[in-house]
């Protein structure tokens, strides 16, 4: 396992880094608490990774990998001949990911300390996944375009994230914000419409919504 540092800073980013630096040690536990309000994050992670349609030996980039909660699910499919590249801007989250890697004796995971916008993708990427990250990224159009260019043909980019619904469930937006505010989610976060960028960058796009449209899984693929 190799950890590379490509750290950059900005005002908004610094706020997010501080939130996740404080929460890094207990992040895995606090993420499970969403089950108390009916949001099963682990189930959605599994659905997203299934949507990647991975094969043994694939190279997968996890943008905003955090503590590495996706790693085991990915490893179960790609095996030791595959590779995971975990990218995150928060050092303490990556420290937790490193501990997870060592505990499981994975030798095929590389961690990159980098802002997602600044990250330069390697050649021959077979899949990209991102969980609860794109609402923090102001230049998400730029990142999605870079992913589309980096992916091998017929390979997929999958996002799990949250947004404000465009239906009657938007009435519950203040409640949703009160539940997620400790993770830095605000109205601006929920206003991002990554699906529009996907439609510009990918030939095939599908989106599935959950919890009245607050949670979504977005899939992009190029022919």
Image: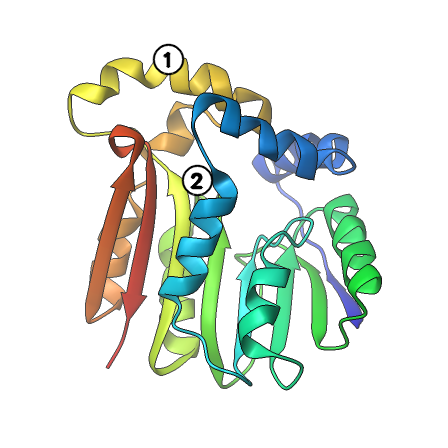
Which one is nearer the viewer's eye here, 40 or 145?
40
The N terminus: image quadrant: bottom right
Q: Earlier in the sequence, mark 2 or mark 1?
A: 2
Element at label 2: helix
Quarter-wise, where is residue 101 in the image? Answer: bottom right
Q: Residue at x 83, y 60 (%)?
A: 103
Q: Position of residue 74 (x, y in %)?
A: 56, 67
Which residue occupies 38% across, 72% down? 53
The residue tagged with tag 1: helix, strand or loop? helix
The residue under the point 71% across, 77% down is 108
- How far apart marks 2 and 1 lie (CA) works out to 17 Å
* Residue 120 appears in the figure: no
**Image quadrant in which the C terminus is located:** bottom left
Tags 2 and 1 touching, CB below 8 Å? no
Specify whether 67 is left or right of 207. right
Quarter of the image for residue 38 reads top left
Identify which residue, 32 or 154, lies in the foreground. Answer: 32
Measured along the vertical axis of the image, is residue 52 above or below residue 162? below
Residue position marked by numbered label 2 in the rendering = 135
For residue 184, above or below residue 118: above
Tell me residue 32's x, y (percent): 59, 33
Residue 188 lies left or right of residue 180; in this view the side is left
Residue 138 lies, in percent from the top left, at: 44, 43
On the picture, is 27 further left or further right than 76?
A: right
Residue beneath disc 1: 174
Of the numbered discs in the image, which one, if any, rests on residue 137?
A: none
Q: Relative to residue 171, is residue 133 drawn left or right?
A: right
């Amino acid at each position: 396992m190799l950890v590379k540092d490509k750290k950059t800073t900005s005002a908004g980013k610094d706020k997010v880094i501080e939130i996740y630096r404080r929460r890094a040690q207990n992040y895995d536990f606090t993420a499970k608490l969403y089950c108390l309000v009916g949001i099963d994050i682990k189930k959605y992670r599994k659905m997203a990774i299934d949507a990647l349609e991975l094969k043994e030996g694939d190279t997968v980039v996890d943008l905003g990998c955090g503590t590495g909660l996706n790693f085991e699910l990915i490893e179960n499919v790609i095996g030791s001949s595959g590779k995971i590249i975990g990218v995150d801007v928060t050092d303490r989250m990556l420290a937790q990911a490193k501990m997870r890697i060592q505990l499981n004796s994975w030798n095929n995971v590389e961690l990159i300390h980098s802002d997602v916008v600044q990250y330069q993708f390697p050649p021959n990427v077979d899949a990209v996944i991102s969980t609860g990250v794109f609402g923090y990224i102001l230049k998400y159009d730029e990142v999605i375009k870079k992913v589309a260019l980096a992916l091998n043909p017929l390979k997929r980019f999958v996002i799990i994230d949250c947004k404000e619904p465009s239906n009657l469930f938007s009435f519950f937006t203040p409640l949703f914000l009160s539940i997620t505010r400790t993770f830095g989610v605000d109205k601006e976060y929920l206003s991002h419409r990554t699906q529009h960028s996907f439609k510009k960058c990918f030939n095939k796009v599908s989106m599935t919504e959950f919890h009245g449209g607050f949670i979504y899984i977005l899939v992009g693929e190029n022919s």
